[in-house]
Amino acid sequence: MIVDGSTGPVRTVAALAVPPRDAPAATSWRSGGRATLSWQHFEDPSGHGAVQFTRVAWLGIGRVRAAAHRVVNDPRRLGNSSGSDVHIVLQVSGTSALEQTGRMLTLEPGSWAAPQADHPYTMTSRERTERLILAIGRKHLSAELSTQSVGRAFSAASGTGRLFFSTAVCLADELPHIRISHARALADQLTALLHVALQYEISFGPVEQSDLRRARVHRYIAQHLRDPHLTVERIAADLGWPRRTLARVFASHGETLMEYVYHQRLEGARRDLLNPILEAHALADIARSWGFVNYTHFSDRFRTHFGVSPTTVRRRAIAARAVASQVG
């Protein structure tokens, strides 16, 4: 990581000017290239982090992995080298604050934003984070989309936003294995996905921070839904939030966090009860597989939620399949 200053525990680095003109001699870096593919990687010898920049045809991909730090984009300082680009910032892990023209956005894992590359901005992280910064030539991105996306945070929780985000991260991971002949096509495809994602997100208006937080909670719950030890306390601890923050995230949706968890488990159990492949599985085993330790508790919640018992759902599904087989 190229350090050009510090403020307390936050280290300041130069971004997207690779290698930086004022890189200290102590910084280790290496580079290479293959026609339309080129890359440069340099690390802070103290182990605080690393910055990588790759050029895929006309698409630039910057990657920052670091402890507490600040990334600065200042076109005046960089000789206006980024003025002809559009920047897309993807928050892979950790939390960052994006500040530009007096406005601040909080980017949490799975969110992304498009700051104005021809105006100074900073990205401040007070924890270990990973972030991608895409530099896309303005001629490759719709001027209307570029303008409407400024000053907003977008979510990669689902849909086209998730497709664009995951594709960008996957491309960054696989760059060492990309063939020269595929570079331009990959740059075109990723930019096309960005167009689709921006069009979709902009059509729904600004994404509030509460929506980004809710999307992050939903992702966490989906990953741990079958764990019987999933609790509000554990979710809050793993996400690094106070319990009251979780309560506020779900307050406007008319259900508590644990009610959401139970509803998702019940929906999953119902799908399994309707699945002919799982017909021989005991009801109690299915309940346990979805985090219900006590079958009576599961059965009562199931009946309340769906209006029928788990036994009735399975019996009707078996009868319906029998009738269908006879008709066939």
Image (cartoon, grey):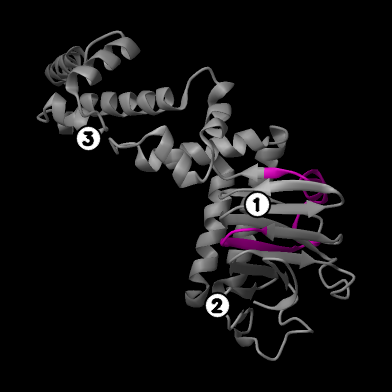
Residue 127 numbered tag: none
Instruction: Say left or right for 226 vs 185.
Output: left
In the image, residue 130 lies in the stretch drawn in magenta: yes
**Amino acid type for the residue under numbered disc 2:** Gly
Marked residue nearer the N-terminal end (1 or 3)? 1
Q: Do the residues labelled 1 and 3 touch (CB within 8 Å)?
A: no
Q: Mark 2 points at which residue?
A: 47
Q: Whole-percent x and y of residue 131?
A: 61, 61
Of the residues shown, which amino acid type is indicated by label 3?
Ser
Q: Is residue 96 magenta?
A: no
Tell me the element at label 3: helix
Alpha carbon distance from label 1 to label 3: 38 Å
Q: Name the residue under label 3.
A: 289
Instruction: Identify the residue at horizontal 70%, vertical 57% (top origin).
Output: 88
Point out the stretch of residues depicted in magenta. Answer: 125-153
Q: Is residue 76 visible?
A: yes
* Disc 2 + disc 1, Cβ < 8 Å: no
User: Residue 297 location in percent, x, y?
Assistant: 23, 19
| Quarter assignment of residue 122 | bottom right
